[in-house]
């Protein structure tokens, strides 16, 4: 069976002057199956958010998705779509929830207006039908008294409620895929769990696929079926979430786990990863993690490809697997 | 939208200058609206020998002019015309300016550069100079044409304002969110950006009304705007030049009404600007 969304060798380029270009997303491949959640994990600047935007071909100017990239939605090649056809995909087949619900809603339009607009963007219905649909969507995302909320403005809602509204907007046209870009980062911890719960519930109820973009391993645990760890524009480790949590194969992934305090188990010093993510202009030619890697050796001056670490488990490290 | 209008009104009303402006403007508008129905025909002439240049008194509250016409009636009718011209010209100017600004802001590159350089060039020519030039050539300009001329020379500032706001808003998260939901360029401009620039447009429009009224009065005073016998405030001041020393009421009252109207419009405009500017809150 073909996956719902298949991404192969996705590459985003930005001109940086003097005829040079950088590739903040550099050959990313993954597949998203119906009804499953795939997490894209990485530090800020690793290219995970840009990957999400690139799937909708919404890379900010002057950047662009390289034509050699393959983005296949249910067998259809999105790279060949014209702008008109892409607009139908955006929101219609792939919905998106952004990080900051404080700024992602238009401050001068009512909640009802904004949801109804999303409904009518992809469906020929009357204004009143769209508003009725907006009301049921608000109820679906767990907002009490939805009829009253329709007439309110974003500033009258709390952060958690706004994110629920954003989710309602993203769901308005019943997309097959929901891209959630750091959906809980701007929210209080208590609200975070509720929003993740909601996303999980909606995925099950609607049979949607969810692409969860996050830097937070705690968000991934127990929610995502599979995960891809990104570093410097590339996927460095890919496996089921359980496999990665049980036996992280890539030194970077291990470094991420070492940076997170645990509540259970003996008290240990955190072992943060030294240094920080280099900008795309300063990526080394070999393994991009090598300069920060505690396990680097001579071979790291050449770039490893994804190597087999186990069944369905790959890692971009020369120390992974038995092959030479 | 009605909520916003309500809050905005309250914010203007809260300021003493805004309240004074609103009250004065409301009284003037009321006067202009119902006055003409209760007063004699402003073009009606009485007996020239006994009825001309009467000082303010019981029969004619503000006196009569040298053609024995009722000054109060002429002032009220002139005010009505001034308000109509000021409002229509300012609205037209704002609509045109907002349209140009939205297009320029939404289409960076050639379109933006072309439109904004044109505006720069137009801004370099004084408004009064263009108006004087056209009106000097175009004798007896009809009223709609005069309004259009005033509007077409008054939109440059608004277009730059709206363009700047549009450029800023284009990078806001909610615009990107709308794009990600499949909204097209036109939809984003009209539905998402325009309501967010409503505030500066409103301020520019309000202050524009005062400008237009003053300009129209000035042009008419120079004999280039509204022609007699249509009563106009500028025209009345012009007509009274010869008798100003002996019958000052013929020009003082229309002059006062011009000042009061422009002042109250500007007070409201300033209060609006203060109410809408987050930095002054």
Image (spheres, helix red, strand yellow):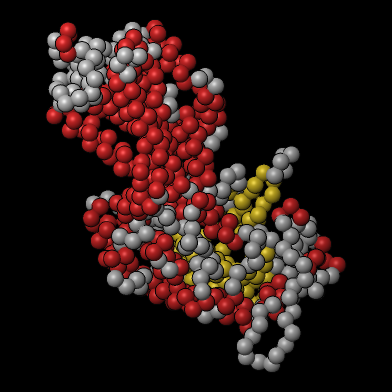
Which residue, as the protein is rendered here, is positioned at the far bottom?
A266
Which residue, as the protein is rendered here, is positioned at the far right?
A298
Q: Nearer the viewer, residue A119 or A290?
A: A119
Image x and y of residue B201, in percent: 41, 39
Asked if residue B238 is positioned above or below residue A154 in the image, the reply reads: above
The reply to whether residue A225 is visible in this rendering is no
The reply to whether residue A309 is visible in this rendering is yes
Image x and y of residue A92, in percent: 38, 55
Image x and y of residue B276, in percent: 44, 48
Q: Nearer the viewer, residue B200 or B265?
A: B265
Quadrant housing residue A252 = bottom right
Image x and y of residue B117, in percent: 55, 26
Q: Nearer the viewer, residue B170 or A43?
A: B170
Describe residue A277's horizontal placement relative to residue A183 as left or right: right
Q: Residue at x 62, y 91 (%)?
A: A264
Q: Residue at x 52, y 77 (%)?
A: A189
Q: Nearer the viewer, residue A311 or B86?
A: B86
Q: Residue at x 52, y 19 (%)?
A: B125
Describe residue B151's horizontal placement relative to residue A298 as left or right: left
Q: Residue at x 23, y 55 (%)?
A: A128
Asked if residue B120 is positioned above or below residue B243 in the image, the reply reads: below
Describe residue A86's horizontal placement relative to residue A128 as left or right: right
Total numbered labels placed on residues in the image:
0
Quadrant housing residue B37 = top left
């Amino acid at each position: 069976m073909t996956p719902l969304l298949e991404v192969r060798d996705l590459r985003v380029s930005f001109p940086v002057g003097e005829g040079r270009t950088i590739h903040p997303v550099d050959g990313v491949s993954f597949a998203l199956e119906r009804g499953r959640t795939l997490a894209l994990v990485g530090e800020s600047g690793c290219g995970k958010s840009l990957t999400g935007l690139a799937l909708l071909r919404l890379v900010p100017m002057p950047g662009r998705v390289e034509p050699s990239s393959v983005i296949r939605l249910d067998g259809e090649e999105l790279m060949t779509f014209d702008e008109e056809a892409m607009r139908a995909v955006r929101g219609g087949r792939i919905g998106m929830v952004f990080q900051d619900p404080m700024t992602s809603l238009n401050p001068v339009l009512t909640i009802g207006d904004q949801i109804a607009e999303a409904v009518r963007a992809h469906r020929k219905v009357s204004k009143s039908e769209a508003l009725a649909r907006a009301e049921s969507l608000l109820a679906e995302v767990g907002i009490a008294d939805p009829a009253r909320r329709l007439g309110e403005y974003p500033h009258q809602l709390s952060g958690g409620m706004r994110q629920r509204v954003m989710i309602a907007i993203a769901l308005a046209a019943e997309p097959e895929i929901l891209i959630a870009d750091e959906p809980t980062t701007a929210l209080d911890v208590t609200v975070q769990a509720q929003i993740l719960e909601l996303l999980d519930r909606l995925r099950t109820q609607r049979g949607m696929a969810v692409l969860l973009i996050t830097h937070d391993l705690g968000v991934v645990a127990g929610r995502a079926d599979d995960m891809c760890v990104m570093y410097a524009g590339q996927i460095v480790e890919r496996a089921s979430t359980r496999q990665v949590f049980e036996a992280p194969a890539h030194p970077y992934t291990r470094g991420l786990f070492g940076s997170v305090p645990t509540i259970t188990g003996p008290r240990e010093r955190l072992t943060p990863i030294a240094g920080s993510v280099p900008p795309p202009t300063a990526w080394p030619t070999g393994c991009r993690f090598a300069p920060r890697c505690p396990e680097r050796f001579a071979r790291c001056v050449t770039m490893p490809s994804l190597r087999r670490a186990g069944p369905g488990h790959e890692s971009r490290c020369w120390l992974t697997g038995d092959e030479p | 939208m009605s909520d916003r209008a309500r809050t905005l009104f309250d914010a203007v009303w809260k300021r003493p200058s805004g309240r004074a402006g609103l009250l004065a403007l409301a009284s003037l508008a009321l006067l202009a609206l119902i006055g003409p129905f209760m007063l004699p025909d402003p073009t009606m002439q009485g007996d020239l020998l006994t009825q001309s240049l009467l000082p303010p008194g019981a029969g004619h509250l503000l006196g009569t002019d040298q053609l024995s016409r009722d000054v109060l009636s002429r002032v009220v009718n002139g005010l009505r015309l001034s308000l109509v011209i000021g409002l229509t010209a300012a609205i037209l100017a704002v609509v045109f300016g907002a349209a140009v600004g939205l297009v320029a802001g939404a289409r960076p590159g050639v379109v933006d550069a072309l439109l904004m350089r044109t505006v720069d060039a137009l801004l370099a020519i004084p408004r009064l100079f263009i108006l004087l030039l056209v009106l000097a050539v175009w004798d007896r300009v009809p009223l709609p044409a005069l309004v259009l001329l005033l509007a077409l020379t008054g939109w440059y500032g608004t277009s730059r304002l709206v363009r700047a706001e549009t450029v800023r808003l284009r990078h806001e998260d909610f615009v990107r969110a709308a794009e990600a939901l499949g909204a097209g360029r036109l939809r984003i401009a009209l539905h998402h950006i325009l309501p967010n620039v409503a505030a500066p447009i409103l301020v520019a429009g309000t202050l524009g009304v005062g400008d237009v009224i003053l300009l129209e009065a000035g042009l008419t005073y120079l004999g280039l705007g509204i022609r007699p016998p249509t009563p106009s405030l500028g025209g009345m001041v012009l007509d009274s030049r010869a008798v100003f020393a002996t019958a000052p009421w013929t020009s003082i009252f229309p002059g006062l009404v011009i000042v009061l109207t422009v002042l109250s419009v500007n007070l409201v405009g300033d209060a609006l600007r203060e109410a809408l500017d987050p930095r002054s809150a």
